[in-house]
Image (spheres, rainbow, N blue to C red):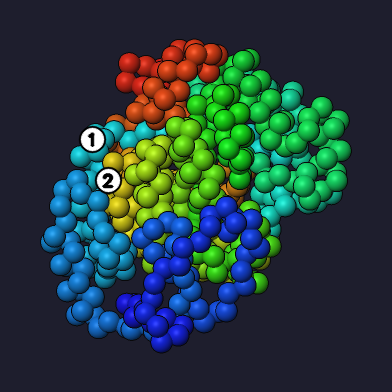
Amino acid sequence: MLLGWRSASSAAIHPVKTNPALAAEAEPPRVPRNRLHYHAPSLYHSIHVAVTLITPSASESRSACAAVLANLRPGAPISREAAIELIRCPDEFLPELMAAARAAKERFKPGVITYSRKVFLPLTNLCRDYCGYCTFRRDPGDPGAHTMTPDEVLAVARAGEKLGCTEALFSLGDKPELFFPEMRKTLRRLGYKSTLHYLEAMCELVLRETSLLPHPNPGLLSTEWVARLAAVSPSMGLMLETTNITLLAPGAAHDNAPDKLPIKRVRTIEDAGKQNVPFTTGLLIGIGETLEDRVDTLLAIRDLHERYGHIQEVIVQNFRVKAAIPMAHWPEPTRGEMLRAVAVARLLLPNVNIQAPPNLSAPYYDDLVDAGINDWGGISPLTPDFINPEKPWPHLDQLRLRTEAKGFSLRQRLPVYPEFLSAVTSKPGLLSEKLRVAADDYGLAQTRTAA
């Protein structure tokens, strides 16, 4: 659908400048369901507008998509307008869109698709956010609620080391001690002030005692905590997910999830950029956002990368239905939606690593290569995907065969991408020393035989 924009009043639309610091602390606004959040080109400008939906004819859609495809310039990022036309292109143009995206990927990193061999460490699944699509989070006392001990962390890391893993992915709920006295008690017993203090210590433990390199996904961070975690991990991550604040409305995907306010997440990503920390982020599609929202989320990421140059990877992740979630009856994104989102991500970000998890797109995951990805993300030979436990990762031999069938070689990388290594190795200390040992001459993982 084309969007015919008109303001809520009769006045012309003008973005309203907001104070990011104040906005980040504000309570998520409750937005009427008949209004949409418009994301202007400047990241911190926003305005609420009513929309008139105009359904283009089939011939108009074909004509617009064909015109955009015909005018693509190799290596040049596409505009918002072009991205919106392409992300809703008719099926007949999907092969041409994917071919353009694959060609853009080949100009960026030809001949190779990478992955990171990892262990997944769910440090704690207690979380103060209640996202409608999540089965990872728990309340204290729920079946499966758990905070790993240092011995458990080290045991998994050492087992992964024997299997040739080089990444220790730490996932955890966002500051659960602020919500749950049980978590505060657990932290006191372990000897730490906060979940972030405990995460910092466990990253340092893995770094010191194994050859694995930590990659934490800790949720929102202050400037100080970005710096502290960067001292014990070569990269870190936070999914932006979406820039649409209406998803915080009652009954929406981020209802009762205060840490999912987009401007708060942008601020963490921006703080990492100011400190030159290699950063992974991305979008989650199929949680109630529009096609335009998907483009605007990618544009917000592009804006951050253009200013700071620190976005090492953008993940395009598709929502998958699970039985025990509020969104259990929500429609999943189609194969075509996923392929369009990946292809548009590649054309918007032609010189950024684009990843899509293969386990969430089985059995057609090898089609994602044709849509322009250059990385499969983390794959574990040991631990499950604790975020999507019902979707096992493909066996590495199968992943290699299907990647090679598409005409690419499969290479193992480190949690930090080769082009970002110097940002970390230029600083003295244990982390830099471990990275130099782990990296080969191309900045990828040293090839070694698993025990």
For the residues marked 1 and 2, what is the alpha-carbon distance in whole angstroms?
12 Å
Observer-nearest residue: 106 or 276? Answer: 276
Q: Residue at x 44, y 29 (%)?
A: 416
View extreme (bottom): residue: 10
Q: Residue at x 41, y 37 (%)?
A: 310
Q: Where is 66 relative to 420, above or below?
A: below
Q: Position of residue 224 (x, y in %)?
A: 61, 34
Image quadrant where residue 205 sits: top right
Q: Where is 95 relative to 110, above or below?
A: below
Q: Where is 258 relative to 235, above or below?
A: below
Q: Quadrant of the N terminus?
A: bottom left
Which residue is under mark 1?
110
Q: Amino acid at mark 1?
A: Pro
Q: How many residues crowd mark 2 within 10 Å: few (<14), some (14–19), many (20+)?
A: many
Q: Position of residue 114 (x, y in %)?
A: 37, 33
- Give the structural element (helix, strand or loop) at label 2: loop
- Give the structural element (helix, strand or loop) at label 1: loop
Numbered circles on residues, count: 2
Q: Amino acid at mark 2?
A: Pro
Q: Earlier in the sequence, mark 1 or mark 2?
A: 1
View extreme (left): residue: 70
Q: Could you tell whether 230 is left or right of 95 in the image? A: right
Q: Give me the disc on residue 350.
A: 2
Q: Position of residue 221 (x, y in %)?
A: 61, 41
Q: Give me the disc on residue 29.
A: none
Kindly tell me whether residue 260 is visible in this rendering: no
